[in-house]
Structures are given as C-alpha cells and as structure tokens.
Amino acid sequence: MRADIVILAAGQGSRMKSSLPKVLHRIAGKPMLEHVIISAQHTQKKVGEGKIHVVIGHGAEQVKTALGHYDLNWVVQEEQLGTGHAVQQALPGCQGADVVLVLYGDVPLIHSSSLQSLLAASNGERLGLLTINLANPSGYGRIIRDGFGSIQAIVEDKDATPEQLAVNEVNTGIMAIPGSQADRWINSLKNDNAQQEFYLTDIVSMAVVEETPVIHVQPQIPIEVEGVNSRVQLMELERARQRQLANNLMINGVTVIDPERLDIRGDIKTGRDITLDINVVLEGDVELADNVCIEPGCIIRNSVIGEGVLIKANSIVENAHIGAGCEVGPFARLRPGTELQERARVGNFVEIKKTVVGKGSKVNHLSYIGDSELGDGVNIGAGTITCNYDGVNKFRTVIGDGAFIGSNSSLVAPVTVGSGATVGAGSTITKSVTDDQLAIARARQRNIEGWVRPTKK
Ligand code: UD1
Ligand code: CA
C-alpha cells in the first residue's frame, strides 16, 4: 500500500512567544516535527511505502534548514487559510497514493502503532478518523453521530450548536483519506463557516453523502494526540516523553534511580545492568555497554561508554570514547576527541581534549591534557598541564608507555616524553625526553643558613 503522509506545520504558534517556529521547539532533544517525521517513516515502512509531504509557512526556511537531511517533499502554504487548504497544497505530490494520512507537526508523540491501526481500518477505502473522548472537549471539532452511531460529520467548536458542544468525542485532526477521493473532496471545500477557513473536517459529510464509510480508531494512550500550543504544554509532553523513555530503559535492563530526574535528549543504546543515578542527562547518540554506572549530575553527549565503566558524580563527557573498565571523575571534563583505552583512570578536576589515554594510564588530579597521545601505564601527576597552544597554533604532546610525569609539570608542545622516562615534579619541559631518561627542569633549591625574618618598624 502506498500511504502518503501530509504533515501540517504551517501555523504560527504565536502562543509560544518565540522567534523559533513552533514545530522546531524540542521534545527529548529533537524538534517536535522530527518526532512526527520519524513516526511517519516508521509507519510507511510497516504498511508499504509512500512519500512524506510537509506543509510549511511561518518560518518555512528555518524549518527546512533544520530538517533538510530528511527525504521530504516540502510544500509551502503562503497563507494559512485552514487545514483543508493546507492539505490541498500537498495533493499534487500525492497523485497515485492509495491513502493520504494527515498528521500535525505540533502533535509530536503520535505513535506509529496507532497510525498503523488507522491505516488498516481505513484501508484506502474508508475515511478513517483518529478520535478521542475528552472530559473537557472545548476547542476541538466534535464527532457527530446519527442514531445508529455512524459518524455523520465533524463540527468545529466555533460552529457548533449547544447540543453538539456537549459531545465528548473529538477529532484529533489525524485522518486517513482514500487516495482516490482526496482530490475531489478537498478541491470542493468551501470556507463559509465561523472562521472563514477551508476546514479539512468538512470532507466527512461529503463522504457520508457519497456513502463512503467513515470509521474511527482511538489512540493507545491520550498523550499521543495532545498538541502543543504553549510552553506549558511543551513541558507537559516533555515530561511524559521522558517517562516513556525511562520506562523503556528499565524494561531493557537499566536501573533508573529516579525517572523524574533523568533526561534523555537523543538516541540511546544500552546494555544490561546499567545504573543511572539522579540528574543524569544523556544527549545525542550515546551508547552504554553492560554494567556501566553513572553517578549523579553527569552529562554524557555523543559518546560511547564501554563495559563496566564508572562515571563518578558531576562529570561531563562529550564526543568521547571510553574503553571498558575505565573510571572517570568526580568532576572530570572529557571534551571532544578523548579516547580512554581500557582501565584508564581520570580523576577530579581533570580536563582532557583530543587525546588518547592508553590502557591503565592515570590522570588522577587537576590536570589539562590536550592534543596528546599517552601510551599504556602512564602516570600523570597532579597539576600537569600540556601547553598545547602558542596563541595561534596547536601542538601535540606524545608520552610513551610507562612514563611518569611528576606533579605540577608543564609540557610545552610540541614535545615527546619517551617510554619509561620520568619527569621531575615542577618541571617545565620544552625539549623532548628520550626513553628511560630522567628530566628535571626547575630552579635549583637554595637553603640559606642564619636567615633572619624581617621585623615590624
Ligand atoms: C483542528 C481541527 C479540529 C480538531 C483540532 C485538533 C479542522 C478544521 N479542525 O482545529 O477538528 O479538533 O484540529 O487539534 O481541521 N495548519 C496549517 N495551515 C493552515 C491551518 C492549520 O498548516 O492553514 C496546521 C497548524 O499549524 C496546526 C494544524 O494544522 O499544526 C491544526 O491547525 P489549527 O488551526 O490548530 O486547527 P484547530 O482549529 O485546532
Ligand atoms: Ca489546534
């Protein structure tokens, strides 16, 4: 079945009070519209094929740029004349589709399984509506049924009679239109209503007149069809989505200490027996292998964390690769291009950037290591700094296997310290040290006998 999907995203979203188009506001780290696109793609894969058309208007260029990497047919709706008019703009691209499924860019949590049910029930032959019953239906289009319970029409809130306003079943806006009828129905919509808009919902009564069956399906959970009009609603959906993501992790063998204090803003792959303590933020593409433990207050972004790694409290890890059995933190900062090989240790107040730290090597206290290559079994003393930048260019520091760098040393790059070499504490190393040498580069100590302290005049 070819199911073309039209995502409506042209509206302004003025209640967001934002210069960012509404559909680009993020939920779980991704623009709302991207969630809808992912769900649409997934649905198409399940039912067969189809194109995705996105109707944009307000902030069109910004939206296109933000999601330009998806294979989408962008359709610009110059003036927002109603949902029917919006879908009409996409129809030329839908020629040959068995069904046209309409989604909203600001209804981000719609789940593919609900869409698949709707498509299965309508099957390109019936007009399918996704509806929901609400205790407070105000603002929504009401589903009007006849005495036999058959759907007769959708009446918008602003056009409804008091009797119709009392109906609790509402239109979520999501509908599956038979491809063979879509053009004819939508091209004959009129705007003679309270809002003078071309209502997509008016095709329901057209279908009824033509005796095309109109069916309904309900979503698995109500949150799926909730729209975002304000930042308060954005936050509510964010928390709901976070809860779903945390539940998925727990179902897959991750201990989450408090799902209310975990935030996932990207795509996370996890092994088993992982523990995520409170106030952890996982962003972008993050992979956590078995037995990883992340202590409170850590941010992990676009990184791969190997088996059994312990990341202690308040550490920040970005674009890094951490090998099995490493320990990091507390208060460590691993910046992009950090690779820790197995069992390496990085301790408190250490910053590492574009550096490979070899197996079992230790950088335990108060150091900055940048643009460097550390062999295996290296020991970097407290307060060691690689001086990698002369104000214009960056230079590399290379340290061989088993080297020992004494505390409070400065390694002025480009510089090499050979395997097994030792650098005395407090040295400023400007010349390379070969294997097994001891380098000391600090002022000699003088002890002065009989020194008399100054006294107050
Ligand atoms: C619409 C439905 C209503 C339903 C409600 C669910 C119609 C006529 N009404 O009403 O039955 O209960 O959604 O939320 O369809 N949009 C465009 N271009 C336009 C108009 C709208 O892209 O010209 C987009 C908006 O950006 C938004 C979506 O379509 O994402 C819905 O538009 P909105 O104006 O919010 O529709 P409602 O009046 O809420
Ligand atoms: Ca709306």
Image: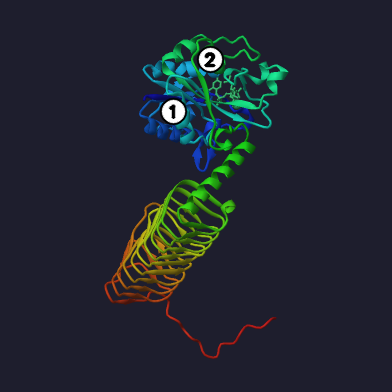
Q: Contact (CB < 8 A) between labels 2 and 1?
A: no
How far across and down, in percent of the image, does residue 13 sit?
Answer: 59, 28
Q: Does mark 1's beta carbon lie closer than 8 Å to ligand 1?
A: no
Q: Which residue is drawn at 61% across and 19% down?
A: 145
Mark 2 closeness class: few <14, some 14–19, many ≥20 residues within 10 Å: many
Q: Does mark 2's beta carbon lie closer than 8 Å to ligand 1?
A: no
User: Horizontally, is 123 left or right of 377 in the view?
Assistant: right
Position above or below: 219 against 401: above
Q: Can I make out residue 389 in this image? A: no
Mark 1 closeness class: few <14, some 14–19, many ≥20 residues within 10 Å: some
- Disc 2: which residue: 203
Q: Quadrant of ligand 2?
A: top right
Residue lying at the far left in this picture: please name it. 435
User: Horizontally, is 383 left or right of 22 in the view?
Assistant: left
Between 335 and 149, the one lying in front of the other is: 149
How far across and down, in percent of the image, does residue 192 sit?
Answer: 61, 9
What amino acid is labelled 1 in the image?
Answer: Ala
User: Horizontally, is 377 left or right of 244 in the view?
Assistant: left
CA separation in Å, label 2 and label 1: 20 Å
The count of marks equals 2
Between 150 and 227, the one lying in front of the other is: 150
Q: Quadrant of residue 98?
A: top left
Label 1 SS = helix
Colour style of the rendered protein structure? rainbow
Q: Quadrant of residue 402?
A: bottom left
Between 418 and 265, the one lying in front of the other is: 265
Label 2 SS = helix
What amino acid is labelled 2 in the image?
Answer: Ile
- Disc 1: which residue: 120
Q: In which quarter of the image is the C terminus?
A: bottom right
